[in-house]
Image (spheres, helix red, strand yellow):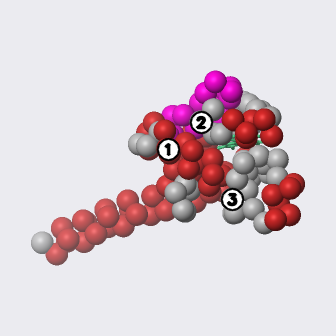
Amino acid sequence: MKSRLFSVSLLLFSFAAVSVMAQEKGSILFEEKCAACHLKQRPSFEEMNTMIAPPIMGVMTHVKDVKTAKPEAVKFIVDYIFDPTAAKALCMKQSIDRFGLMPSQKGNLTKEEATSIAGYLYDNYGYGK
Ligand code: HEC
């Protein structure tokens, strides 16, 4: 009984560790692949004037408005990373008017990396986060 309890807690611990690792991977990949354009924090007055893409919490709020469930949101983001078009965009039209369409990141990251980033973004950004 005791050893069974131990196995169960070990299993739970492993799940927690795996999910923490996934979070970290997504966060590191975002820094490497997306943060040059998308700010992670709310922009300062100065950043408001110099930013070259919408900050990611705003992006995620718009994405989650339409793609409420995580699998749909992740699917949308992964597709947009590689094949952005104005017709697909869920952000405000002003974003594209101001910054231009996001350049495709094809060749810059793998689909697996994109999926990891998208999951991390869904879990951490949008709606006051
Ligand atoms: C070279 C700059 C640049 C890089 C790098 C970049 N983006 Fe973007 N992104 C933009 C711009 C500009 C927009 C706003 C215009 C638009 O929606 O296409 C945007 C918009 C978006 C949107 C909103 C799409 C919509 O519905 O309108 C998502 C989601 C997004 N980016 C995710 C990412 C992720 C994830 C990465 C990293 C893999 C990334 N971007 C890398 C410039 C960039």
N-term-proximal mark, 1 vs 2: 1
Whole-Å distance between the Cαs marked 3 and 2? 19 Å
The answer to whether mark 1 and mark 2 are in CB contact below 8 A is yes
- Percent of width and height locating residue 29: 66, 51
Answer with left or right where residue 81 lies relative to residue 20: right
Magenta stretch bounds:
73-88
The answer to whether mark 3 and mark 1 are in CB contact below 8 A is no
N-term-proximal mark, 3 vs 2: 3
Whole-Å distance between the Cαs marked 3 and 1? 19 Å
25 drawn magenta: no
Which element type, helix, strand or loop, lies under badge 2? loop
Q: Residue at x 65, y 39 (%)?
A: 92
- Percent of width and height locating residue 26: 59, 52
Q: Is mark 1 within 8 Å of ligand 1?
A: no
Q: Quadrant of the N terminus?
A: bottom left
Q: Residue at x 78, y 35 (%)?
A: 97
Q: Can you identify the residue that label 1 sits on? A: 65
Indicate the amino acid at tag 1: Asp
Provide the major secondary structure of the magenta segment: helix
Indicate the amino acid at tag 3: Lys
Ligand 1 shown in quarter: top right
Q: Can you identify the residue that label 3 sits on? A: 40
Q: Can you identify the residue that label 2 sits on? A: 90
Which element type, helix, strand or loop, lies under badge 3? loop
Indicate the amino acid at tag 2: Leu
**Displayed quadrant of residue 109:** top right
Vertical placement of residue 117 versus 78, above or below: below
- Percent of width and height locating residue 53: 77, 46
